[in-house]
Amino acid sequence: MARESYRTLAEKAARRVREIMPSELRRRMATERDLLVVDVRERGEFDAIHIPGSRNVPRGILEAACEYDYAETEPDLVEARGRPVVVVCRSGNRSALAALVMQEIGYANVASLKLGIKGWNDGDHPLVDGRGIPVDGDDAAHVIEPRLAREQIDPSRRKG
């Protein structure tokens, strides 16, 4: 049996959840008052740049944040099982995995943002920093997609 990779796990999750495009999320944010946008990136990523109105629940604490009786409990998130929820990450991989977990623990109307915040930025939708100050999309690109260090690149694909 072939070993699963992060990429294949994310692809499988994406096939099992509803994915929406950034333009649909923008429309829904303008029309659905009870929509909850959950950004599962790490706190530093979120503080650097995020979708206005989204709330940060890092992927590493998501399951506990969705339940009462944990230090990580987010009461608004626990109570959102019947509300529409869209999960966001950088590229759509973590959000697909998170949306699948949320589906499995009882969230009835959860979707993943296809292409993630990268796609949101590519669509010229608004972004803010941790203080709520608007961030220009061109300035955001290097924050959203940092360069990989040489040792982070698969040795079989390294040049030179």
Image (cartoon, rainbow, N blue to C red):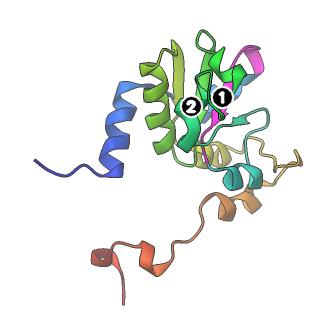
The answer to whether 147 is drawn above or below residue 40 in the figure is below
* Quarter in which the C terminus is drawn: bottom left
Task: Please report contact status of discs 2 and 1: CB closer than 8 Å, yes or no.
Answer: yes
> Which numbered dot is residue 64?
2
Residue 78 in the image: x percent, y percent? 63, 19
Which residue bears the numbered disc 1? 73
**Distance Cα–Cα, label 2 vs label 1:** 6 Å
Judging depth in this view, the residue of 15 and 98 nearest the camera is: 98
Which residue sits furthest bottom? 160
Does 19 appear in magenta?
A: no
Of the two numbered discs 2 and 1 on the same chain, state the one appearing first in sequence.
Answer: 2
Q: Residue 89's image quarter?
A: top right
Residue in the picture at 71% in, 21% down: 75
Question: The residue tagged with tag 2: helix, strand or loop?
Answer: helix
Residue in the picture at 30% in, 46% down: 8
Which residue sits furthest left? 1
> Could you tell me the amino acid type at mark 2?
Ala
Q: Residue 74's image quarter?
A: top right
Residue 54 in the image: x percent, y percent? 73, 34
